[in-house]
Each structure stands twice: as C-alpha cells, then as structure tokens.
Image (cartoon, rainbow, N blue to C red):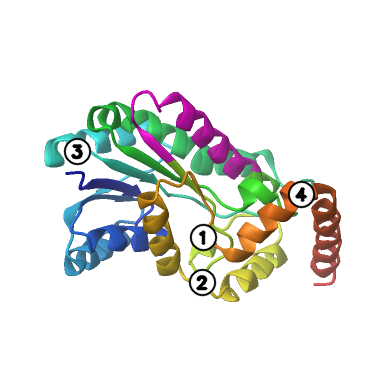
Amino acid sequence: MQNRIMITGVGSGLGREIALRWAREGWRLALADVNENGLRETLELVRAAGGEGFVQRCDVRDYSQLTALAQACTEQFGGIDVIVNNAGVASGGFFAELSLEDWDWQIAVNLMGVVKGCKAFLPLLERSKGRIINVASMAALMQGPGMSNYNVAKAGVLALSESLLVELRQQEVAVHVVCPSFFQTNLLDSFRGPNPAMKAQVGKLLEGSPISAADIADYIHRQVAAGEFLILPHESGRQAWELKRQAPERLYDEMAEMAAKMRTKAQSR
C-alpha cells in the first residue's frame, strides 16, 4: 500500500495544508522546510490529524540536503511513494527593474529546487512506482505583467513536469503539476522585488481570493486520485487558460492594459 509522502515547503501555507490532507488518510510524512519552527508546528498538526512522520530542515537550493532527505526517507520509511515539490518564493517587479540577482534567486528556488527534488528522489520513486507532484502556478500558463522572473521559473516547472510525464511513463512513475492562481497564503513573507508598490498589489490579490490553501489541498488530493496531470484548482484559472488557448492575442491585450495600470499606480506612490 502506498502511504509514504515527502513534501517540501511545509512550514506554512499550501505545503502545510497538503501535509494535513494526506495525514487525514493516515499517511507517513517526511516534512521539509527551511523554517524549523514552522516544521515543528506542522508535525504537531499532522499527528493531531492522524498522520505520522519526521521533519528535516532542507533548503531546496542545496542538492546535498535533498539527497540527505531522500536517504532519511529510506532509513525511516524504507522508501517513498509520493513527493510534492512545493517550496517556493514570491517575486515581482517589471523586467527593467529586476536585477540579475533577483533572477538567480528566483530560478534557484522555484525552478532548480524542483529539478533537484525530482533528481534526488527519482531512484526511490522508480522502485516504488510512485508519483511526483510539482507545484507550479497559473503564472506558468498566463505570464502576467510585473513578474517575469517568477513566470519563467514556474513555466520551467510546467515544462519539466511535461518532460517527466512522458519520460517516466515506462517506469510507471506518475507525474502531476499544480497551477494555482492567487489564494490566501503567507507567500508574501518571502517576497522579493525592487518596488514595494508591487508587493502591496500582490497582497491585495492574495487577500481578495475566495479560496484557501486548505481548499486547494483538497482539490489536489481529488485530482491526483483521478489521475489528472494538469491540476488547475481555481475556476477563474481554468477559464483564463481556456481563453488563452482560444484567443491568445485578446489575452495579451488585456495583460498589456494591466501592465500600464500597474505602472501608473506604482509611479503615483
């Protein structure tokens, strides 16, 4: 029976809610994050929800820490059945303002962190015929203005997931990619960008969302069980993706208008 799962970025937000959703099914969980206090809190909540497991501090930028986590899963659980590459950071700013350091940081965490997670755990997943769940974003599909480095990193996660989907089918390793829109989360705690006004605008979008991280975790659980590859938890996100596929130029026009409004608002502060 498959009941061993590893999740990165579980110290808060969506990662924590994913952990709790699987914990309610009695799974054993390997919990990873850079925030050790958040990790301990999540483990307590996981145990209260009916799960069991262990925590390990892990910075997904460091491949050796991910291979050490995979080794810990082997020692504690005898292997792993599911990995969730969820750890991520927020970023924003118009392209002309973003520094190359902003780009390096964003790619290192949001894209290469997922690449390294898949690489470190693939031998275990091939053994268990397990599954990979990569958390991207609607930014992977829609590329909104004022967040080009975030868009590129998340689009990379989607492209990686598509590549793995076809490459690993013969090995019977299943792959899923999740593309949430904005939702109620503390993602802004990690926000990095040249313009404080951009952070404020993103904050309003997050607060105004009618859907919580727990709702998204529940949706992910259902869609993974149904074998869905591309998981779009938001109805508005599914509609936007449909519009882009049917009339991409119309969407680009809307995004250009949005960019102009954002720039005006940022300049007026």
Distance from the alpha carbon under mark 3 to that under mark 4: 47 Å
Q: Which residue lies furthest to the front in this view?
A: 226
Q: Can residue 11 be seen in this view?
A: no
How far across and down, in percent of the image, does residue 256 sit?
85, 55
Q: Mark 4 points at which residue?
A: 246
User: Is disc 3 in contact with disc 1, using a CB cutoff of under 8 Å?
Assistant: no
Per the rendered image, the range of residues in magenta is 152-175
The dominant secondary structure in magenta is helix
Residue drawn 55% across the image and 40% down it: 158
Determine the secondary structure under disc 1: loop
Q: Residues within 10 Å of mark 4 (few under 14, many from 20)?
A: few
Distance from the alpha carbon under mark 3 to that under mark 1: 32 Å
Query: Looking at the picture, which amino acid does disc 3 mark?
Result: Ala
> Picture quarter containing residue 146?
bottom right
Q: Can residue 173 be seen in this view?
A: yes
> Picture quarter containing residue 79?
top left
Vertical arrangement, residue 199 with respect to residue 107, above or below? below
- Comparing 255 with 40, the one in front is 255
For the residues carrying marks 1 and 4, which lies nearer the camera in this image?
4
Query: Looking at the picture, which amino acid does disc 4 mark?
Result: Gln
Q: Name the residue under label 2.
A: 211
